[in-house]
Image (spheres, rainbow, N blue to C red):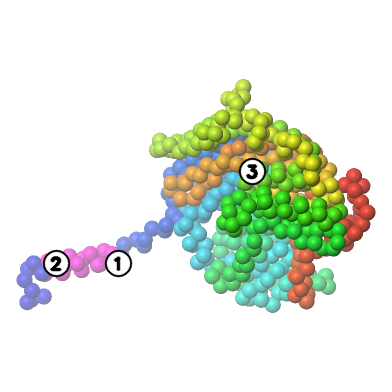
Amino acid sequence: MANLNPGWKFLLLALAAGTAALSHAAPPRDANALTPAQAREDFELAVAAVEAGLPDVTWFQSRHDWQTAKQGARKALAAVKDGDGLFRVLRPLLSRIGEGHLSLQRSEAMRAADRQAQGLLPIDIRWTEAGAWVMASWDTAASIAAGTRLLAIDGEPVDDLLREAMSALGHDGTIRTGVMRDLDGAGYARVRHWMRGAAARYRLRLQDDAGNMYERVVEGMAASARPEPSKTASSPLAALEWLDGHTARLVVPTFSNRRYREAGADYHAILRAVFESLRDRGATDLILDLRDNGGGSEGNENELFSLLVREPLRKYAFVEARGATVSVRDAHGRRYAAEVFDTQERKRQQRSPTGRLLRRNEPPEGLMSHWEPHPEAFTGRLIVLAGGNTFSGAAELSSMLYHARRALFVGEEVAGAHAGNTSGYRWDVELPNSHMRLHVPLLRFRFAWDELPLGRGVPPHCAVPPGLPDPLGAARDTVLGVARALAARPWTPDDPPRCPEP
């Protein structure tokens, strides 16, 4: 530096000092990190929004249980250091409410970390009411054959693992089938990582086809190492398939008007054509497949019901919202608000004595399935295929048909509660510190019947779980197979037959 002037010497010394300071500086802040105060702020905002938006947080639990659960969650906040920790406290609290349309979306930073996660369970699983089975296996678990029964992980029975998963996902009431379908394939590995983080290895308790039980220790795998499931674009349109001269299968994948518009089709026109074909060809048996229908636009389930049941049905006891507007303020006084109804919809509401808004029982929506008898409704026998992916509007249709004693159900318990749901308009609240997004449904739809235990869905007359791996690799639809066998037997909804073996 002897040949440099004093100004350059000073600059170089300053740069060197800055470089040294940077080399000893703390590492960059974790994008998921939260201070205790930030975690509490987000938690209290989420709870306040749920209590301000949901018409009834104690539909499927007692008020005392809700208060106790909130107190326990607040105590757990002391250990929260990041978004994952807050998720593990907040999501179980929301899940116990039993509203499947109430969701908590992980932040973009959390999802990015999920994609790079290590130490995930290296097996894909099929969950059923009868147990859990390995569907596929990876890395150090690759030698475990598809179809092997899973009994426990690290000494915890699968029933206990399913209970934990119920706390990590939304569901109606106490229904497990919707959660089971969310856990299918890699779903359980992902959810387990949300709730527990990574593990270097897992001890699996297994049972082979011969009934022999044994244990395997497998290593955790990287999320990026698991192959992406193949995505085949399926049509959203209702489709009719003739199985024989008098039996047809109608697959209705969705009630979403948006998806029909995107496909360049009209839901109402397709339904009309379907039922004209049934009438023209003299169908005596119809298998209605709702297994992958998660709902959609309100009213479309009613139109299908009117084509299956001639006489109108009082569907809802009431439809209510807390008010025309819902709002809360966070710890800093910032206001979060949503308008529940648009101008036209607001005119169809009336104020209750408690100040709630109740839907008037008048067309076009009201509280009825439909308003006039449908002269061309299908009157033949009806078999409904339903299960853990049958939700929202499709679950409502299932409940209506079950209440009307119109059909035999084959498959699993329907994922939507038979008592009703809270759905419709939605309030989206971004939690300011963790950036998780809370989606609060705002309309409570209470059905006009109480035929099942509170919090349960329509049960199958013939219980058939989704298919397990076939030893020869062939795809078999055992649920449809049972339905076809039923269509060949004599029965009525009031005198159901003995269920065929899958």
Amino acid identity at mark 1: Ser
The residue that mark 2 highlights is 11
Amino acid identity at mark 3: Glu
Give the side of residue 365 with respect to residue 409, left or right: left
User: Which quadrant holds residue 221?
Assistant: bottom right
Of residues 166 and 14, the one drawn nearer to the viewer in this rendering: 166
Image location (x, y in percent) of residue 166: 66, 51
**Which quarter of the image is occupied by the N terminus?**
bottom left
C-alpha span from label 3 to label 2: 70 Å
Q: Is residue 89 magenta?
A: no
Give the residues drawn in magenta, as a range.
9-22
User: Which quadrant holds residue 280?
Assistant: bottom right
Any part of residue 21 in sight: yes
Q: Earlier in the sequence, mark 2 or mark 1?
A: 2
Image location (x, y in percent) of residue 109: 46, 58
Q: Residue at x 48, y 54 (%)?
A: 107
Element under label 2?
Answer: helix
Any part of residue 221 in sight: no
Q: Residue at x 36, y 62 (%)?
A: 27
The residue that mark 3 highlights is 298
- Name the front one of labels 3 and 2: 3
The residue that mark 1 highlights is 23
Q: Earlier in the sequence, mark 3 or mark 2?
A: 2
User: Which quadrant holds residue 365?
Assistant: top right
Q: Is residue 344 above or below residue 174?
A: above
Q: Is residue 15 magenta?
A: yes
Of residues 470 and 269, the one drawn nearer to the viewer in this rendering: 269
C-alpha span from label 2 to label 1: 18 Å
Q: Residue at x 82, y 63 (%)?
A: 243
Q: Earlier in the sequence, mark 1 or mark 3?
A: 1
